[in-house]
Amino acid sequence: MPEGDTVYRTARLLRDALEGEVLTRSDFRVPAFATVDLAGERVDSVASRGKHLLIRVGDVSIHSHLKMEGSWEVYPVGARWRHPGFQARVVLATATVAAVGFQLGILEVVPRSDEERIVGYLGPDLLGADWDADEAVRRLAEHPDQPVAVALLDQRNLAGLGNAYANEICFVRGMLPTRPTKDADLPATVALAHRMIVANRDRAQRVTTGSTRRGESTWVYGRDGRPCLRCGTLIERSELGRTELEQRVTYFCPRCQT
């Protein structure tokens, strides 16, 4: 699933293409909103909130979530798309460009007043202008017995981290993903999470090690069976979560993390 930095860059792409422009066409290819027509309306703003995107047009907000497979792409009007048309969920066109949302996990058009209902439950946004580290620490501390990786992934605690970051943060902090939150240095963990995601918000390739060499851009994530870049021990893979729906794959070095 895309992480908060991916959504942040997507919002910037859409902001540069659409913000302040008048839509010449809107085409919502989901049954619930197929009759919505925003042609003639101006795009007031585009914002990311954790992993959510909000495109504010007139009196409504277009809310989308990429989930696992989704993406937004911008093309010159009339240009050929890189994905088949049946994967498009929405097209927002201006006089010069078309922004197309492909395979979006969530797409809905709601009154602007409903934004709080959609994203109000989220914790502090790691890439938001109103980032509040103290509040993130407070929310994490409310779950003392929860595995720290699970707590970091809970968007109600802090918004924007996905599985890749949770695993990398645990490695850099030297703690197993299963360590109870009460035994973690939460201020240091939150500070690292913020530094790591901010460092990657403008990068096309996510890097947590400082190396862009093939196979070395992450410490543990996706590296099961390969030697730890720090000590040489083979990285292990496991699953964490109480139910099948909650389960997340974890990666860790059994020597560097305790």
Image (tube, rainbow, N blue to C red):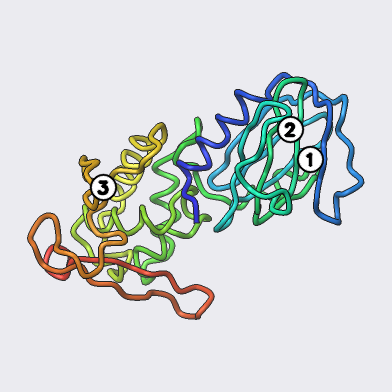
First-in-chain label (2 vs 3): 2
Q: State which mark lies toward you, 2 or 3.
A: 3
Disc 3 marks which amino acid? Ser
Q: Quadrant of residue 213?
A: top left
Residue identified by numbered label 3: 217
Q: Is residue 140 left or right of residue 219?
A: right
Q: Residues within 10 Å of mark 1 (few under 14, many from 20)?
A: few
Q: Is residue 56 above or below residue 2?
A: above
Q: Is residue 173 above or below residue 149?
A: above
Q: Residues within 10 Å of mark 3 (few under 14, many from 20)?
A: some
- Image quadrant containing the C terminus: bottom left
Residue identified by numbered label 2: 56
Disc 2 marks which amino acid? Arg
Q: Residue furthest bottom?
A: 243
Residue identified by numbered label 1: 113
Q: Residue furthest right?
A: 35
